[in-house]
Image (cartoon, rainbow, N blue to C red):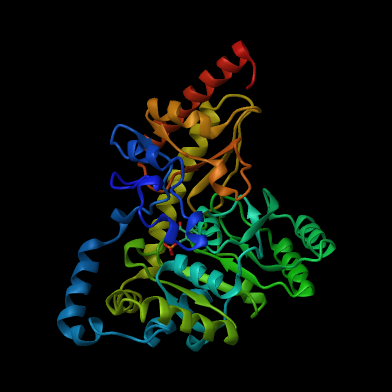
């Protein structure tokens, strides 16, 4: 929470807010993250891309030319659907994951977060059910909460979303006379679970959703950041009804705030109208920067640079965990992306442990943040994307020390 936050009782407008604004509250752990930002703390919490690996001089020169040569367009209003040239570039990027799409099917958004917000606005009335993996991306859960959706989590394992769990969830809803509005899923290099949906399961999940007439939102920010071989085929590549979300936040830079949705015609039309009412149009400058970057910079090689960098950090984290985590901890082995999902010894609560971890100068995100139903206390998310390898080693060592100390407390006083 920022230092300027007002206590609700002192807010003169409290009675005037819409009901949905009641769900908009800062998370309990936000204050701790202000402390975690101190340089002496190794933060394994945030999922910030390592922007210093970009050729900033070349990007800066490109940006300068763009404004000098085409400023009259780059600094002008644009269309609600987004720059057509950029949308062509986006189709080329998506072709790496087997998607064949026309630029007219793409809607540019302010990061994929805005696409999530607009889609939720389009699909969800208060109380409507959204199916989502358990755990799920915290930003999506925040958006679903702000539109008063009722999130029903579907279990995952190390091969991603479990098809029988999805079928059971759908049957349970049908039995109660309800239906879900959509499935929200992040099939490749999941945030926070660090796992990917296996090839056979991709077909199974699509089959279940098709038979149930359930729209699928495939959120895919990390798809190109796999460490082994070619990118997986996206769900959208095999089903044009899937609503696909992409972003340049992880492959170029999040500060540009350029993402997109690829959606069937009806949804696309609503998205353009919703985007226009939210922001009129997106930043022309940011869109043209990305368009120029794709046209003039070696972006495929740059994605490889990021992949290698994150692979080294993933390896460092996995080696450090194996070397120092006490018995009773388990963790996922991400094949790409930014995150490891760590399970604590039974009876341990990651949120209760966080102040002690920060006192030991290491930060993580407690698992409860990734569930809408208060579960997940026994897990935490670790990010390896931003800290240098030596800091990752030190952070994991400190965390292991904190968990060891908790285990000793448990042995002395029993589990709470
Ligand atoms: C799964 C997932 N979806 C969406 C986003 C939002 O990304 P952006 O709005 O920067 O495109 C993130 C960012 O971390 C993410 O991890």
Left/right of residue 4 with respect to residue 339 in the rendered view? left
**Percent x, y of residue 151:** 64, 57
| Residue drawn at point x = 71 percent, y = 72 percent | 214
Quarter of the image containing the N terminus? top left
Judge by depth and name the residue closer to the eye, 103 or 212: 212
* Figure disc tally: 0
**Percent x, y of residue 352:** 52, 30
Quadrant for residue 282, please give it. Answer: bottom left
Quadrant for residue 342, please give it. Answer: top right
Left/right of residue 121 with respect to residue 307 in the rendered view? right
Q: Is residue 94 above or below residue 332?
A: below
Judge by depth and name the residue closer to the eye, 47 or 389: 47
Q: Residue furthest left?
A: 68
**Percent x, y of residue 380:** 54, 39
Quarter of the image containing the C terminus? top right
- Viewer can see residue 193: no
Judge by depth and name the residue closer to the eye, 11 or 149: 11
**Percent x, y of residue 299:** 37, 69
Q: Residue furthest right?
A: 175
Left/right of residue 338 with respect to residue 131 in the rendered view? left
| Residue drawn at point x = 40 percent, y = 84 percent | 80
Q: Is residue 372 above or below residue 326?
A: below
Q: Is residue 355 above or below residue 43?
A: above
- Viewer can see residue 382: yes
């Amino acid at each position: 929470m920022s230092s300027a936050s007002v206590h609700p009782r002192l807010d003169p407008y409290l009675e005037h807010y819409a009901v949905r604004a009641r769900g908009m509250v800062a998370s309990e752990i936000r204050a701790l993250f202000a402390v975690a930002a101190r340089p002496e703390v190794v933060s394994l919490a945030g999922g910030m891309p390592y922007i210093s690996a970009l050729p900033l001089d070349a990007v800066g020169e490109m940006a300068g030319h763009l404004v000098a040569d085409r400023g009259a367009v780059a600094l002008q209003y644009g269309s609600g659907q987004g720059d057509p040239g950029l949308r062509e570039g986006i189709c080329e990027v998506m072709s790496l994951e087997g998607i064949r799409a026309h630029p007219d099917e793409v809607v540019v958004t302010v990061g994929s977060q805005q696409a999530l917000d607009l889609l939720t606005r389009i699909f969800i009335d208060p109380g409507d059910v959204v199916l989502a993996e358990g755990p799920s991306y915290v930003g999506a859960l925040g958006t679903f909460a702000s539109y008063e959706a009722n999130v029903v989590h579907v279990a995952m394992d190390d091969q991603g979303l479990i098809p029988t769990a999805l079928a059971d969830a759908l049957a349970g809803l049908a039995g109660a006379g309800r239906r879900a509005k959509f499935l929200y899923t992040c099939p490749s290099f999941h945030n926070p679970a660090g796992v990917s949906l296996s090839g056979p399961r991709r077909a199974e999940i699509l089959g279940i959703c098709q038979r149930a007439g359930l729209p699928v939102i495939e959120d895919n920010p990390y798809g190109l950041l796999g460490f082994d071989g070619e990118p997986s085929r996206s769900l959208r590549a095999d089903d044009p009804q899937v609503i696909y979300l992409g972003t340049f936040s992880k492959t170029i830079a999040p500060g540009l705030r350029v993402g997109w949705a690829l959606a069937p015609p009806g949804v696309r039309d609503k998205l353009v109208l919703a985007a226009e009412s939210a922001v009129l149009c997106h930043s022309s400058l940011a869109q043209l920067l990305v368009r120029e970057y794709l046209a003039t910079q070696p972006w495929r090689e740059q994605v490889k640079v990021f992949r290698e960098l994150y692979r080294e950090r993933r390896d460092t984290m996995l080696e450090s965990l194996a070397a120092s985590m006490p018995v009773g901890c388990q963790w996922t082995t991400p094949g790409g992306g930014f995150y490891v999902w760590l399970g604590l010894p039974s009876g341990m609560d990651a949120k209760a442990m966080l102040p002690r971890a920060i006192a030991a100068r290491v930060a993580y995100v407690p698992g409860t943040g990734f569930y809408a139903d208060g579960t997940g206390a026994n897990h935490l998310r670790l990010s390896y994307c931003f800290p240098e390898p030596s800091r990752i080693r030190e952070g994991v060592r400190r965390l292991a020390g904190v968990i060891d100390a908790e285990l000793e407390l448990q042995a002395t006083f029993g589990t709470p």
